[in-house]
Structure formats: C-alpha cells, structure tokens
Amino acid sequence: MDPDEPAAVINPERIVFMRDLVRGAKKFVEEYYIPDVLAIAPFYKDWFTRGEGVGNFLCKGSRNWLAAIRGSRVLIGGLGFGFTLKSALSALASDATVVMVELLAAVVAWNRNPSFNLAA
C-alpha cells in the first residue's frame, strides 16, 4: 500500500467511512440483491450446476458469440482476484479493447505481485 496515497491513510475517519460502506453494502445485499436472486433463481437452475456460480457467465458462458464481435469494447468494474478480466481477455476477439477500472491501487498492486499466486 502506497503511504502517500490519500486512500491508504488509516485514521478514525477512514475507519468510520469504511464501516459505513460495509453497512451500506450489507443493506443493499439483504434488501435488494438476495430477494432479486431468489426471485429469478428458479428460472436459471442450470447455472448452479457450473460449480462456480454465475459471476463470469457473460465472459465464460457463450464464448463463441463474444469472439465473433470484432472491435468490441468492454468495461470491467473492479479487479478483485482478476478472474473476470482473465475470462474476458480469453473470450473476446483479439482486436477487442478491455478497460478494467479499480479504485484501490493496493488491489492492482496485489494482482501484479508474482509472489501472490492466487490472482488469476
């Protein structure tokens, strides 16, 4: 983590900010995401047999049509462990443009570090 990066400073205000973000995310998941998933899940039973959920279905589920779109542009929000980015790069045509947006420099640095072999 870069100590000169303002987002990397740990202080009481930052802790409260992060706590509030987590609470907001938890509320969203409980009040909107889970009810929506439960409402539509019966229509997509076959997706749950894939062993990894549906997180990368658009990248992995139908590679043939993705590779056929020449000059496509894809935006990926959040790097995480890099699996969505890796899936997109392997599924898209060679002339596709992929833009990955990650807010935290520490996440990017973690993924670039070769000693962390968990990254995709």
Image: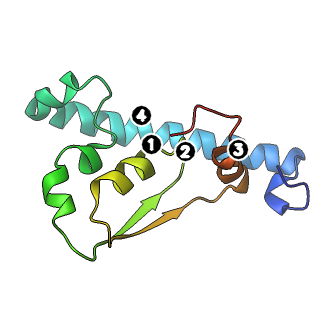
Decide if residue 7 is on the left or right side of residue 62.
right
The residue singled out by tag 1 in the image is 83
Decide if residue 4 is on the left or right side of residue 78.
right
Q: Position of residue 32 (x, y in %)?
A: 35, 42
Amino acid type, label 1: Phe
The residue singled out by tag 2 in the image is 80
Counting the numbered discs, the total is: 4
Picture disc at residue 30: 4
Q: Residues within 10 Å of mark 1 (few under 14, many from 20)?
A: some
Q: Quadrant of residue 29?
A: top left
Amino acid type, label 4: Glu
Q: Nearer the viewer, residue 118 or 34?
A: 118
Single out the mark in the foreground, 3 or 4.
Answer: 3
Asked if the residues shown at circle 3 and circle 4 are in contact, with their CB atoms under 8 angstroms apart, the answer is no
Q: Position of residue 110 (x, y in %)?
A: 69, 44
The residue singled out by tag 3 in the image is 113
Q: CA distance from mark 2 to mark 4?
A: 21 Å
Decide if residue 105 is on the left or right side of residue 32.
right
Secondary structure category for the residue under label 1: helix
Single out the mark in the foreground, 1 or 3.
Answer: 3
Q: Earlier in the sequence, mark 2 or mark 3?
A: 2
Q: CA distance from mark 4 to mark 1?
A: 25 Å
Asked if the residues shown at circle 4 and circle 1 are in contact, with their CB atoms under 8 angstroms apart, the answer is no
Please tell me whether residue 70 is drawn above or below residue 28 in the rendered image. Answer: below
Q: Earlier in the sequence, mark 1 or mark 3?
A: 1
Q: Earlier in the sequence, mark 3 or mark 4?
A: 4
Q: Quadrant of residue 33?
A: top left
Q: Nearer the viewer, residue 78 or 39?
A: 78
